[in-house]
């Protein structure tokens, strides 16, 4: 299981960007975090074209499929979507890892039992303003 932002485990940070210009202010070889939204397709296309690792936060199963097709390295979901997203990722052999957003360490055990690829805690996400 992957852990991002857990207090026991050192991990990469995710830099939450809201436009293309802010990508230049992020550290090299970091993971860019983008909310999946049609308004953000320009950012996603830029990340693809420049071969930059990125994570997409999605809200439903259709967006899980879009995130994989768009080349996301990580697909971030809420816990209620995690089991279904993981099953789809395994069925379609996604390259992307499914990460479930958690707020509390007590939530980890259930996600382990569900076979989810990893968890992401709020401390792993740094919001970048332009």
Image (cartoon, rainbow, N blue to C red):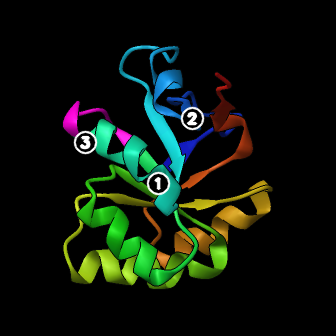
> Which callout, 1 or 2, points at the residue further toward the start of the chain?
2
Q: Which residues are magenta?
A: 49-54
Q: x%, y% of residue 17?
A: 57, 35
Q: Name the quadrant of the N terminus.
A: bottom left
Q: Are marks 1 and 3 in contact (CB under 8 Å)?
A: no
Q: Quadrant of residue 4?
A: top right
What's the magenta bit mostly, secondary-structure-wise?
A: loop
The label nearer to you, 1 versus 2, is 2
What secondary structure is marked by label 3? helix
In the picture, the quarter occupied by the C terminus is top right
User: Which numbered disc covers residue 56?
Assistant: 1
Q: Which residue is pictured at 46% across the width and 82% down the height?
A: 61
Residue 27: x and y in percent read 47, 14
Sequence-wise first label, 2 or 3: 2
What residue sits right under mark 3 in the picture? 48
Give the residue pinned by disc 2.
17
**Whole-number angstrom distance, CA of label 1 to CA of label 2:** 11 Å
Residue 87, placed above or below residue 74: below
């Amino acid at each position: 299981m992957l852990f991002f932002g857990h207090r026991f485990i050192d991990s990469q940070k995710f830099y939450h960007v809201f436009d293309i210009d802010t990508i230049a202010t992020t550290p090299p070889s970091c993971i860019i975090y983008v909310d999946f939204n049609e308004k953000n397709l320009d950012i996603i296309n830029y990340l693809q074209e420049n071969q930059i690792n990125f994570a997409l936060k999605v809200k439903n199963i259709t967006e899980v499929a879009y995130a994989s097709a768009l080349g996301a390295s990580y697909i971030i979901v809420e816990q209620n979507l995690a089991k279904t997203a993981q099953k789809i990722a395994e069925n379609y052999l996604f390259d992307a890892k499914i990460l479930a957003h958690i707020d509390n360490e007590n939530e980890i055990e259930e996600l382990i039992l569900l076979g989810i690829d990893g968890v992401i805690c709020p401390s792993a996400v740094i919001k970048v303003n332009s």
